[in-house]
Image: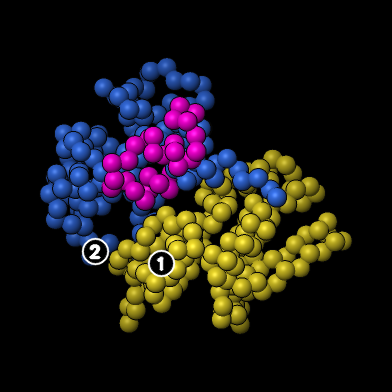
Chain colours: A blue, B yellow
Amino acid sequence: MSPLPPARHLLRAKDLADARYAEPLGVGDMARAAGLSPAHFSREFRRTFGESPHAYLLTRRLERAASLLRNTDQSVADVCMAVGLSSVGSFTTSFSRLFGKSPTAYRAAFPAASTWARVPACVMRAYSRPQNRTFREDAPEPASIPSSMSAIDEPGGGK
Amino acid sequence: MIKIGSAQVWVHDQDVALEFYTRKLGMEVRQDVTIPELGGFRWLTVAPPGDHEVSIVLMAIPGQPVLDDATAEEIRTLMSKGFAGTVFLVTDDCQKSYEELAARGVEFTETPEDRPYGIDSGFRDPSGNSFRLTQVRDLG
């Protein structure tokens, strides 16, 4: 029997973030889904998918939040809670950094949902997740990590 | 007239795949032929009951001399990272199909949700391949 490649277990963690971002989920839960210790997991996830699990989970939440801002009339605070984030202040800061405008300004800039093309939801999700941006381009990074990794990569890393 | 006969997905293990596609997805084996003179190459196809037009080929990732080790490893990596392709299945009742498959232990990545084009859900096979399971809205 051919062994399952290790990346398959990491994919389970990525899928968990995609499926259950609305819950108070953290990197520890993702590590458990992959069956790895948190430290080993974060390293392997980054090596496999090119970004840290924390960054993946946060950008998934922000992508979902952006979708709610475009397609619903929920308040910014409700949108924040609906994607599994608890601090509206941090949400607004992260959102503004990655989308280049505040949640309120972002909502105002988009047309109504009905004008969107009928592309499958999986395509919407995959293509509208915001790119991670760095505020610390000059910070030394381990050689194996692209220099575009951002200040939000690790919990507390951007503070 | 040209029609689609089969489309292929890479699997890390054909026996594991066969078990999943038949027992969990409820598909039927269409062809299962092993060819000794081709180094034991196994042509394995499955399809949903009643669907005799199109089948899915469950293809093992070959080694030498078909593929060099590095290329085989690249395919294995893409597959297990979930980016080797997607199969788009349709159903007349997404919620019912979801409940049946989830009860058999299928690993869903998205539960049924209402979309402009219909009710859509997603799952993975044991190798990491992505599947959509969609109840397409009649846009009349």
Residue occupying the point 40% across, 46% down? A16
Asked if residue B28 can be seen in this view, the reply is yes
| Alpha carbons under labels 1 and 2: distance apart | 32 Å
Going by the numbered disc 2, the residue's amino acid type is Thr
Q: Residue A63 placed where, x, y %?
A: 30, 46
Q: Residue B121 placed where, x, y %?
A: 39, 62
Q: Quadrant of residue B133?
A: bottom left
Magenta span includes A28: yes
- Residue marked by disc 1: B99
Chain assignment, label 1: B
Q: Main secondary structure of the magenta part?
A: helix
Q: Which residues are magenta?
A: A14-40
Residue occupying the point 39% across, 75% down? B93
Q: Which mark is residue B133?
A: none
> What secondary structure is marked by label 1?
helix
Quadrant of the image for the C terminus of chain B?
bottom left
Magenta span includes B80: no
Going by the numbered disc 1, the residue's amino acid type is Glu
Residue occupying the point 75% across, 48% down? B63
* Residue closest to the eye, A5 or A71: A5
Contact (Cβ within 8 Å) of mark 1 with mark 2: no
- Residue marked by disc 2: A115
